[in-house]
Image (cartoon, rainbow, N blue to C red):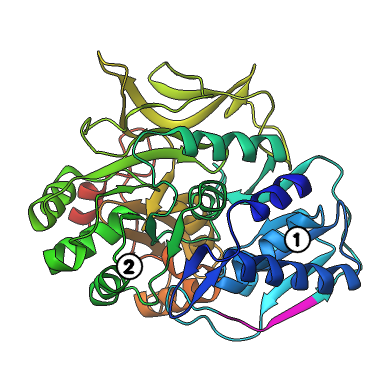
Amino acid sequence: MREFVTDLLRRHGDDVPVFSHEHTVTRGALRASVAAEAGLFAASGVGEGSTVALHVPPSFTQLEVVLALWSLGARVISVDHRLTPTEVDELRALTRPQFFVRASGRPVGIFRERYELVTERRSDGGPATTRHRLVQFTSGSTGRPKVVGRSTESIIREVLRFGAAEGMPRYGERMLVLNSTAQSFGLMGGLLHALASGVHLVFAGKLSAEDVLRTAARHEVDFITGTPFHFDLLASAADRPSLRTVRGAFSGGELMRPEVAERFAAAYGFTVGECFGTTETGALTMDAAGTSRPSVGKPLSDTTIRVRDGLVEVALDQSPYLDHDDPTRYLDGWFRTGDRGEFDARGNLRLLGRADSLVVVRGSNVDLTQVEATLRAHPLVTEAIAVHDTVIEAYVSTGSDALTPDELAAWCAQRLAEFKRPQRVHVLRALPRTPTGKLVRNPRVLADAR
């Protein structure tokens, strides 16, 4: 990874812009910042194979630190800044980083330029024993996070896939990135694609249609990437002049509902495309123009996808999981995504929904079993069910009349990141069951039981 990052930083001229928010960072300034950060980390003992957990909100600082750590040959463990201290402690226990880097201030908006950093050296940490240089986390079927490792070779292949994809932004174009740069797409399709291709990244500071539109107009962006939530937000504003320079956009993180795509197209006069992938595999398919909806496009170069028993599977040369093998997800060289799907006559992949407990909330994976386990940990809760229709709802049974939905919401707020928390909690004397005694998970049946 060290050589790859060094090569990316040397591409294009010193005066070529690479990031913009309130201010613009040029290639030359970025190289200087990365070198300075790398020097500080090296002085702290970070080097080839060091393991560093990074708990920093999306920012110029976060992007520069990732590059600095990779330039030293370190393994970057990306920790979502929205997680609670309890969740962060669980991830640290799973990965045992030698260093923990966090922002000293509270997050501001969805992006800010700079944060002060605090670096802690941890005596219980250990160095990397594999070639994986990026570690991320995804929800598992038991609610326990799974540790996903990406090797240098895997990362490079994904960057090349983005570069070869039809319709992706090219040299000199401005791309407004609404995806989190701490997550897979923001790093690969945002940061690394931009460095490789000479794309100029633009960031909005607030999660509001007004701020996003103002940012797009100010920087005259050519392209927008985000999640369906972002495009739904923009469709509600319907300010076509603000996006007059935009030639295209695509959504990732979760499948866009047709009605959202139609509302956005009607409001702005162009269609949002689709990009499908997973944390374990990176980007897999792309339809940047959105012409093949309801499919998510054809497989990208250097990917092999099949549908077996109705489930989408991807060929991988090794398990993506570092903590333990899971034969229900990876077996005989194939990774089972958990998405149901089919190929149409033109070779486009169409997704038909999830086949497991994983749901996507505003572009982030949430395992409903984790929500249920958190609720069941309350001493007065006997059973709990979490379901997702348009939002996460929880149904719990309790032997006490004293337990209220507000108390359970407060319990979850201490233990679950904001996007994982139930939007509504219902306390029942008993949860409905099927004739065979299993708990009902149908949202409509549960709603009738209230």
Q: Which mark is residue 23?
A: none
Marks 1/2: CA distance? 38 Å
Q: Is residue 151 left or right of residue 241?
A: right
Q: Disc 1 marks which amino acid?
A: Leu
- Location of residue 317 in the rendering, given as x and y in whole percent from the top left corner: 67, 23
Residue toward you, 309 or 213: 213
Question: In this rendering, is residue 442 above or below 216?
Answer: above
Residue toward you, 102 or 181: 181
Q: Is residue 249 left or right of residue 141?
A: left
SS for callout 1: helix
Question: In this rendering, is residue 52 above or below 260?
Answer: below
What residue appears at the point 66 percent right and 55 percent down from the top-left corner?
9
Which badge, 1 or 2, is on the more N-terminal residue?
A: 1
Q: Which residue is mark 2?
A: 423
Q: Is residue 384 magenta?
A: no
- Location of residue 402 in the rendering, given as x and y in whole percent from the top left corner: 40, 80
Question: In this rendering, is residue 393 above or below 415?
Answer: above
| Mark closer to the observer (1, 2) | 1
Q: Which residue is mark 1?
A: 69
Q: Is residue 196 visible?
A: yes
Q: Is residue 118 magenta?
A: yes
